[in-house]
Amino acid sequence: MPLLLLDLDNTLLDRAGPFRRWGERFLDGIGAPPTDIDWLISLDADGLTDRWDLADAIRDRYELRIPSIDLVEELHDGVVAQTRLDSLTACALRIADDAGWVPVVVCNGTVRVEDAKIRRTGLDRYVADWVISEEAGVSKPNPRIFALAAQRVRMPLRGAWVVGDSPEADIGGAAAVGLPSVWLHRGRTWSDVRFAPSRTVDGLIAAVATVLAS
């Protein structure tokens, strides 16, 4: 029974869509132009921008009196509330499980946010366990977080596959630990010359099919 080590945001759960929906509602609530959603999405950088920096930039642009800590809470809770588990993703995970694979989530982020996404969406019913970088004390692409994921479910890393959308964190992490990987390209072209994914697909369903076919 090999491990299927899966990223969370924009792999198992869409993040781009929920962030856009939250952003549109937030901007409407403060009376900002709807076109400012492009600025907000660009500033967010697909979740890579620190939440405190993002909150401060929003406060400065719109001259808001909202305390930064309250805006950070809004950023966290608002996106989580908009996040849903796609039924096809749940089906793919069930098929992988039936085929003998053990799905485990390995993600970077805070326990409060990532754990809430996993539990609130019902994703916890379709995976064996999950490891979040804040709790683990180590982040992808460090090989140790993948080893911790294997320890969590008491299984060896040998034979595992890594699936994710981040070139550095997911595919770089897989290369560092010596595991095959599937990259979810999301319309992007691979450009890193240091390492490369074993397979490239357009979404989670195709990724699971690729792993099962291996």
Image: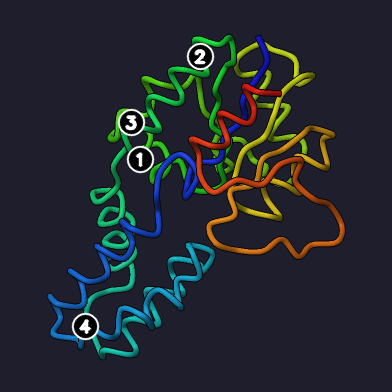
Amino acid type for the residue under numbered disc 4: Pro
- State the residue position of label 4: 34
Pick whichever of labels 4 and 3 is earlier in the sequence: 4
- State the residue position of label 2: 97
Residue 18 left/right relative to 211: left
Separation of residues labelled 3 and 1 (CA atoms):
6 Å
Instruction: Compare residues 174 and 88 and report the one nearer the observer.
Output: 88
- State the residue position of label 3: 119
For discs 2 and 1, the disc positioned in front in the rendered view: 2
Residue neighbourhood size for the residue with mark 3, other residues' Cα within 10 Å, grouped as few (<14), some (14–19), many (≥20): few
Which of the labelled discs sits on residue 117, or is there none?
Answer: 1
Pick whichever of labels 3 and 2 is earlier in the sequence: 2
Residue neighbourhood size for the residue with mark 4, other residues' Cα within 10 Å, grouped as few (<14), some (14–19), many (≥20): few
For discs 3 and 2, the disc positioned in front in the rendered view: 2
- Check disc 4 and report its element: helix, strand or loop: helix
- Classify residue 22 by image quadrant: bottom left
- Check disc 2 and report its element: helix, strand or loop: helix
Instruction: Compare residues 200 and 124 and report the one nearer the observer.
Output: 200
Separation of residues labelled 2 and 1 (CA atoms):
21 Å
Q: Residue at left 50%, top 39%? A: 204
- Check disc 3 and report its element: helix, strand or loop: helix
Pick whichever of labels 2 and 4 is earlier in the sequence: 4
- Are discs 3 and 1 less than 8 Å apart at CB? yes
Report the quarter where the N terminus lies. top right
Picture coordinates of residue 78 (x, y %)?
Answer: 25, 57
Q: Where 173 falls versus 96 (above or below)?
A: below
